[in-house]
Amino acid sequence: MAQNHSFPNHYQTLEVPPTATQAEIKQAYRRLAKLFHPDSNRPTANHERITSINAAYEVLGDPKRRQYYDCELGNYVAHRSDRTTREAEAQCTHRRRSSGQATDDAIQLWIRYVYQPVNRKLGQVLSPLKTQINRLAADPFDDELMEQFQTYLDECRDRLTEAQRIFQSMPNPANVAGAAANLYYALSQLIDGIDELERFTVSYAENYLHTGQELFRIAARLRSEAQDAIHTIAR
């Protein structure tokens, strides 16, 4: 699940060219944030879009992370001074000449800044489900129990939104593509699962509850497969 295949690259997300200056990137981010932020009360407000915009700015707004990102994309561009551009090109060339070490470094960075925090978020969503459902099963029509269950679902959605932002913040190295794909699909299954469980809170229809639980089981399996892949790579 390489970044440039799974999602638009960060320059496309912020609607700027790779040659944009840091000031232009900041200006573009502010413009898009005002346009799409869910609290803006505008018809263009879009929760998923603002998540992608924030993830893109988190990388491109930081010159050092942008340099790493550009190296991954092969963008040796004029948004830097000639000296800085030459230094960036030299660093990328060195990475390619020392491809083995560079690959190991990229994998460790991705595991630390993407896999580990996303994996934690998945665990925080998955682990409490059985307890939450058992508690609600005592009396699904009890307003207090249902409110507690809804609070759990709201917290899950917040964690998944943050996990998506983290996942999009850095392109994954090719060696961890399988683990990245499993994380991506686990996130998707959990988001759909939350939707099904929320439908249950409104209709009390058991099929929504069962579908939500099944989607959570699929997500747990995908997460486990991602963990196994990372453990194999990290040996």
Image: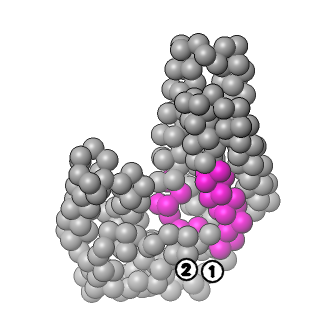
Give the number of the disc on residue 95: 2
**Residue 6 % position (x, y):** 55, 70
Decide: is 27 above or below 36. Answer: below
Question: Residue at image x 64%, y 18%?
Answer: 140
Examine the structure image and report whether residue 81 is included in the region drawn in magenta: no
Q: Is the magenta stretch mostly helix, strand or loop?
A: helix
Q: Which span is picked out in magenta? A: 166-189
**Residue in the image at 24% along x and 58% along y:** 35
Q: Can residue 219 be seen in this view?
A: yes
Q: How many labels does the image show?
A: 2
Image-quadrant location for residue 89: bottom left
Question: What's the amino acid at mark 2?
Answer: Arg
Q: Is residue 102 left or right of residue 213?
A: left
Q: Helix, strand or loop at disc 1?
A: helix
Q: Which amino acid does label 1 sit on?
A: Ser
| Quadrant position of the N terminus in the picture | bottom right
